[in-house]
Image (cartoon, rainbow, N blue to C red):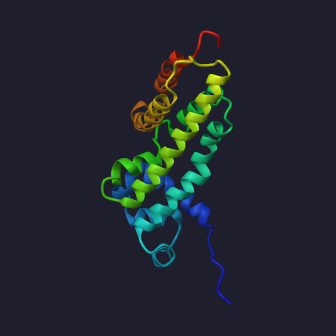
Amino acid sequence: MPRKAQYNLDAILSQAIDVFLEHGYHGAIMDEIIARTEFNRRGFYLEFGSKQTFLYMVLEHYQNHHLSKVIKHLESNQGLESINQFFNQYVEHVKGKGCLLINSITELGFDDQKVREIGRHYLDRLQIDFIGCLEKAMSLGQIHTNTNIESTALQLTSYVQGFAVNAVLAGETDELQLATQALLGPLQSNNH
């Protein structure tokens, strides 16, 4: 009978998020990953095979356990309210540290096909969710009827990427909340 693992994989993947957020992929050295996850080197390579494979698992965990909590607002599809809730929670999520997925795309997207695919899937999902919320907002009279929904959804998706990068620079300031208000204010119809 195979031995049961003596570690909590979710806890290890969660601890690794902080290491990759602090140092990026290339800056995260194996000694620190091993020390911070309390994994031994031999066990690490038996379980994950490589640092790169480990990053893919960390990114999947990050999406499933962190980003999904933020995206659920868009998926509730309550129009402009869902978009506002998404940005409010996203800003809190990335404040001072950025977004592991966007950071990884920025650092590795040119060279790593798998990171590019993960990123493309995430951004496509965001854009589709924004389209749904904008369509709902239009049907509720929350936004102008002449709003180009597809291009606005693309713009909002692009802002998500920019917010993730700017969050590192803005630190704990209110810059991102102000930017969110400036972004969403012009969309609203006079009836709302």
Quadrant placement of the N terminus: bottom right
- Rendered image quadrant of residue 88: top right
Q: Which residue lies furthest to the top in this view?
A: 190
Residue 49 position within the rendered picture, expressed as x and y whole percent measured from the top left: 44, 75
User: Is 116 above or below relative to 176?
Assistant: below
Q: How many marks?
A: 0
Left or right side of 11 for 33: left
User: Is 146 above or below relative to 11?
Assistant: above
Residue appearing at x 52%, y 70% in the figure? 39
Residue appearing at x 61%, y 47% in the figure? 68
**Front one among 5 and 71:** 71
**Front one among 75 and 146:** 146
User: Is 36 above or below relative to 148?
Assistant: below
Q: Which residue lies furthest to the left in this view?
A: 111
Left or right side of 3 for 31: left
Quadrant placement of the C terminus: top right
Q: Which residue lies furthest to the bottom in this view?
A: 1
Left or right side of 173 for 72: right
User: Is 23 above or below relative to 13?
Assistant: above
Residue 144 position within the rendered picture, expressed as x and y whole percent measured from the top left: 56, 16
**Front one among 82 and 30:** 82
Residue 91 position within the rendered picture, expressed as x and y whole percent measured from the top left: 53, 33
Residue appearing at x 55%, y 53% in the figure? 62
Left or right side of 106 for 144: right
Q: Which residue lies furthest to the front in this view?
A: 146
